[in-house]
Image (cartoon, helix red, strand yellow):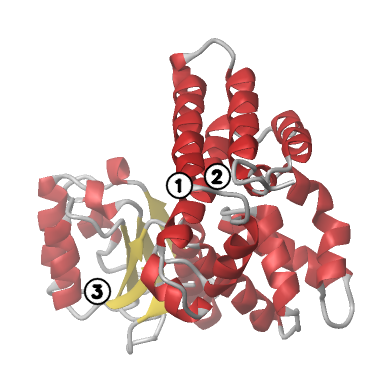
Amino acid sequence: MARKTANDDPLAPLTLAVGQEDLLLDRAVQEVVAAARAADADTDVRDLTPDQVQPGTLAELTSPSLFAERKVVVVRNAHDLSADTVKDVKAYLGSPAEEITLVLLHAGGVKGKGLLDAARKAGAREVACPKMTKPADRLAFVRQEFRATGRSATPEACQSLVDAIGSDLRELASAVSQLVADVEGTIDEAVVGRYYTGRAEASSFTVADRAVEGRAAEALEALRWSLATGVAPVLITSALAQGVRAIGKLSSARGGRPADLARELGMPPWKIDRVRQQMRGWTPDGVATALRAVAEADAGVKGGGDDPEYALEKAVVAVARAARSGGRG
């Protein structure tokens, strides 16, 4: 979810959207454009990439108009602007034009940091659009999407949706919109299951879950379905690695409440409970063996082997066997 500074007027002279989450960056732009067009339906919107912003371009776009029209100028990937163009932008920040809203989209890293600092110093309205890499962040995003529509969804439904769809925020937002449009009343886990069972079965994390639980046949079935529906092999090796590492982390951690372990290991509490259920049968040697097998598969799917599918099948079987190495039946 995009976070904003205290200056939350979308018609502020300068909005700075910082981060790498494309959906949130696009929404930051849409919010400004919607506010501008609400104030003036004839607002002119210019949406530009760095190569379209040369020295002098900004001065031309923001020069006074005979018709005094409102204008929104969006500059995407502002961190990629040339040095001469950055000078133009910095000069403009010192004396912004009336009826003009400049929106700078910046990745937020070291590249182009001078422009980022200058925009903040100029008092930019800032919208944080960080990449959501943690499952807990995506879960919070889904909850907020439902709240924004005024609809109720159970915690289990939100979690099931994240499990089914994965990490793509656009797809998660689209799924929420579809459920809200199609379903009356509270959205529960059963509803999500009816809509997205196929997606859940195709999920790379479903493959990993079945493998670390020692359920080789089900893991292989999920693997074949995932590949048939277009899931990238590298996502599957990544999910397998995450699953095995989580087993290793939790098995070596001291006992405690899920909330305490979550802070210690950097996992959401719900995942602590899930991994605890999956740990039975695992040994330290089993974790090491499984990680080696996943590493070999990862090399295979990234070009080190002739048959990525076979490499994945070997890894899934190896992980499932390692899960049973402690005598699990």
Decide which of tag 3 and tag 1 comes sooner along the chain.
3
Residue extending farthest to the top is 306
Sequence-wise, the earlier of marks 2 and 3 is 3
Residue 102: percent from the left, percent from the top? Answer: 31, 67
Q: Is residue 291 above or below residue 329?
A: above
The residue that label 3 is drawn on is 97
- The 10 Å Cα crowd at callout 1, few under 14, some 14 to 19, many 20 or more, is some
Q: CA distance from mark 1 to mark 2?
A: 19 Å
**Is residue 67 something that shows in the picture?**
no
Which mark identifies residue 284? 1
**Dot 2 crowding, Cα within 10 Å, few <14, some 14–19, many 20+:** many
Quarter location, residue 63: bottom left
Tell me where residue 221 sits by quadrant.
top right
Q: Secondary structure at mark 3?
A: loop
| Marks 1, 2: nearer the viewer | 1
Label 2 sits on residue: 239
Sequence-first tag of 1 and 2: 2
Residue 325: which numbered mark, if any?
none
